[in-house]
Amino acid sequence: MLKISKLLLLIHVCAVALMAQNQVVDMPAGKLTRRNFLSRDPFILAWEKNQTYYLYKSSSYKDAEGKSHPCFAYLKSKDLENWEGPFPAFIPPQGFWATKDFWAPEVHEYKGKFYLFGSMYSDKHKRGTQIMRADTPEGPFVPISEFPQTPAEWMCLDGTLWVEDGKPYMVFCHEWLDFRTGPKGLGGTIDAIPLTDDLSAAAGESFMLFRGSDAPWNTARTNQTYVTDGPFLFKENGELYMLWSTGGWAGYTTLIAHSKSGKLAGPWEQLNETINASDGGHAMRFKTFDGKVMTTYHGPNSGATRVVLIEGPIMGNDIIRVKKVR
């Protein structure tokens, strides 16, 4: 039965890839600087093989009839300042389950392949994060499952990959929209779910890491709910940390959580300082080709939202250490 299921999934993936390749896609590309293109939830992948940086973003394209449709795209750069694109990364094939809210794509290299984690939504299915696969960072990415790997009964977004002791997990946000009634401080949450080795499906039940209301900087969207956005895990000096974003007193805010055990299961504590408290967030970290550690986020959260880069370490005994903001 398992072999038959995998065969059917392979047939489905091949059919999806073929339908996507046969679509007419109008997505004009151009040359841009970091300061003159708009982008939310920036995720940058540095690919050593061709010494190129890839920035993944929400986008749209026009079909042969001139109708606009949501999709995921990428820009590419050699120096993080001058960019070219956008180019299509994932074009949903005809009949694809999601029709709107294509948000927060990020791409991870895992066991020789590249996996795009993207959050999507439709009127018939709740929002969730689904995983697509490609041979290179440029795609084309194709789904490796029919529906998202996040729990189908929840509103979920912003899934990211974390591998611990050789086992893959998706860390994601259980949205505040599922917690609009109930006791104060109930939600939203950041959760994790184990994945199969090929990332195609959940390999067990999800478990909560912490609530948005745990953070000292957080403010409730309503009297009952707290926003959780954009988790990104990293290690520094052997310690496990997580960047995540929420609403703060001055707008969208990025905070830091620390795992006391050094493991994904925690327990997690919220540190007192923020990466940015002035209406910017959804941060991630990467290393440049000359070895510099960079943190990027979008700011401001409203209006002309652009990519911000912070150079240097950001952790040190609960104090943010920033060398330079570019």
Image (tube, rainbow, N blue to C red):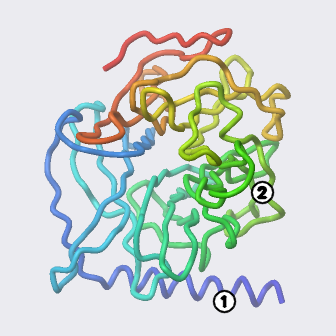
Say whether residue 160 is left or right of residue 48: right
When asked about the image quadrant of residue 60, the answer is bottom left
- Tell me: residue 66, above or below residue 206: below
* Nearer to us in this view, 109 or 41: 41
When asked about the image quadrant of residue 238, the answer is top right
Point 42% across, 32% down: residue: 251
Who comes first in sequence, dot 2 or dot 1?
A: 1
Say whether residue 143 is left or right of residue 257: left
Residue 241 is situated, as x and y percent measured from the top left of the image, at: 68, 28
The 10 Å Cα crowd at callout 1, few under 14, some 14 to 19, many 20 or more, is: few
Whole-angstrom CA distance, mark 2 to mark 1, is 22 Å
Which image quarter holds the C terminus?
Answer: top left
Count of numbered circles in the view? 2
Which residue in the structure is indicated by mark 1?
8
Point 79% across, 85% down: residue: 3
* Nearer to us in this view, 182 or 107: 182
Which image quarter holds the N terminus?
Answer: bottom right
Which amino acid type is shown beneath numbered disc 1? Leu
- Disc 2 is placed on an element classified as strand
Say whether residue 166 is left or right of residue 237: right
Residue 173 is situated, as x and y percent measured from the top left of the image, at: 63, 51
Which residue in the structure is indicated by mark 2?
194
Residue 315: assigned label: none
Residue 14 is situated, as x and y percent measured from the top left of the image, at: 52, 84
Say whether residue 53 is left or right of residue 60: right
The 10 Å Cα crowd at callout 2, few under 14, some 14 to 19, many 20 or more, is: many
* Nearer to us in this view, 2 or 301: 301
Which amino acid type is shown beneath numbered disc 2? Pro
- Disc 1 is placed on an element classified as helix
